[in-house]
Image: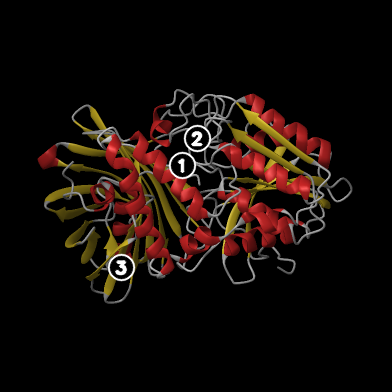
Amino acid sequence: MNRAPIQLRSAAVALLAALAAAPLSSAGAQRVSKEPAPPAPDTAWFAVVLNTDTLATESVVRAGGTVSGDLRLLRPRPMAVQYTMFLRSDGGVDSVHTTTVDANVAARGTIVIRPDSAILTMQAPGLTEPQVARIAAPPGALPFINLSAGALDVIFRRARTIGGDAATIPLIAGPQLIPAQIRFVGNDSATVSLGAELRAAVARDGAFLGAVVPAQNVRFVRLAARPASRTAGAPERAAGDPYAAPAGAPYRAENVTIRTPDGATLAGTLTLPRGASAGTPAPVVVTITGSGPQNRDSELTGIGGYAIYRQVADTLGRRGIGVLRLDDRGAGASSALSGSETSETFAGDVRAAVAWLRTRPDVDARRIGLVGHSVGGMIAPMVAAGDTLLRAIALLATQSRPGAELSAHQRQQAIAQDARIPAAARDSMFRVAQAQTDSLVAAGGANAWTRFWWTFDPGPVVRRVRVPVLILHGETDAQVPVAQAEELAAMLRESGNPDVTMRRFPGVNHLFLADPSGHWEGYAALPSKAVPPVILGTIADWFVARLGRGG
């Protein structure tokens, strides 16, 4: 699993610090849509400044009926909040999905807004069950994220849609409901009272351009470019379109939309060699992310600069292989999660993506491969076992055992790393916690994804895979033991698969980063978040040998 399986000691604090801080205080063939292409994503960057001290930075992307933000809080302590709001046609919000990392503790939150209430859900590895709260909320309530320019943008635009010079909008801040009074002053200014008055510069449609909170000397400043935070080794993103091909790259990038059989929308980016055409179709690899909603680059909140699939796409693109990478449901510009999804759902999304690729004349339908990381590596065989046209799959840091066994391993790792737990108490603590979780899942108390993962045994599916398989694993991986990679290779070979390659990398963790410890609590502090070239080269060499080049 990509999300750090941490034993949460302050998960509620981590989530509520972001959502409820005191206001302003600190698979038939699928086709791409034939409708006109949507406008390019509207991207903006902001800094929140107190006197001359930067409190936070944020990137905000408005695209495809969503507003997504990556908020990095710097003071009084580092914390990261990544969120996606799914908008209604009237500017309201149907739901918001957040991932919050505070002191290396990761938590996910969801707010689903109904006409008379809001349902707040928090879940994180280490919690025995999701924490759910329902609060009464009148129609038109909006989520509020403290110090977030993206949240303010949604609020002011909604107020403009309501009309008039003033509007009252109830804001959901964690379990609290705050009435916000918005007043417009002409076409370019507005105020909002949230305990302290915020004076904003806005566009005619209410778009947020910047603000000042005079009582606190806090300013929201719109920046001309993304704050410098790129990690060496990851290909530079182009200004404007964050998924455009780097300058001078021998491949082109196309943002695409794919419809699934159940009506979901998957947004993504297809990179193809510049020479790919109907006469010279290119091979393509589809990427599959791990657990939890992730964007197409597989970026992880709190681990700035990590973008394994952006690196994979760039590496393969320079070797003549196309890559289709997609935002998961619940992330980026793809459809929202319903709560009923399992790994079978996401396998269906991959099948829809492969079917869509086979309709393109510039893609070679018989040279398509898959690469899955963590749980994505569990999904890849689910697709390949039933698709004889696939040419090759790569499994990165993939489990060979059911989730219940892997969860037990991760819980043991978490207890062993906690110096506050006496050694004599660790075994009994583990047994009690594991029994509670087993009972919860058996009673149907966990969500649908967890229930599926808990009992699903990858072995029978893996043994049905006949296409060439590459298995890569880091030897310091504390989330999925490297022995499980050996088990996967043995399963495939014993079942008669003639082309199985397995590679272990010393000093490499679950994210394929150089890491002598490998424990998830140290991910954020690693000096480099770039996947080493030897790993990227191994992936590229293997796929070139099985798929060839294109363009």
Other-residue count near label 3 (Cα within 10 Å), few / some / many at <14 / 14–19 / ≥20: some
Please give the residue where the numbered disc 3 appears in the rendered image: 119
Q: What element carries label 3?
A: strand
Q: Is mark 2 on a helix, strand or loop?
A: loop
Q: Quadrant of residue 4?
A: top left
Q: What residue type is labelled 3?
A: Ile
The reply to whether discs 1 and 2 touch (Cβ–Cβ < 8 Å) is: yes
Rendered residue at 24%/61% (across/down) = 172
Q: Which amino acid does label 2 sit on?
A: Tyr
Q: Which of the two labelled residues, at mark 3 and mark 1, occupies the earlier sequence position?
A: 3
One can see residue 293 in this view: no
| Distance between mark 3 and mark 1 Cα atoms | 25 Å
Q: Which amino acid does label 1 sit on?
A: Leu
> Front-most of 440 and 288?
440
Seen as rendered, the residue at the extreme bottom is 116
Other-residue count near label 2 (Cα within 10 Å), few / some / many at <14 / 14–19 / ≥20: many
Q: Which of the two labelled residues, at mark 1 and mark 2, occupies the earlier sequence position?
A: 1
> In the image, 466: left or right of 338?
right
Rendered residue at 55%/35% (across/down) = 237
Rendered residue at 68%/62% (across/down) = 352
Please give the residue where the numbered disc 1 appears in the rendered image: 300
> Front-most of 104 and 362?
104
| Distance between mark 1 and mark 2 Cα atoms | 7 Å
Q: Where is residue 15 in the image (x, y as percent from the top left)?
A: 28, 50
Please give the residue where the numbered disc 2 appears in the rendered image: 306
Q: Quadrant of residue 266?
A: bottom right
Seen as rendered, the residue at the extreme right is 279
> In the image, 196: left or right of 547?
left
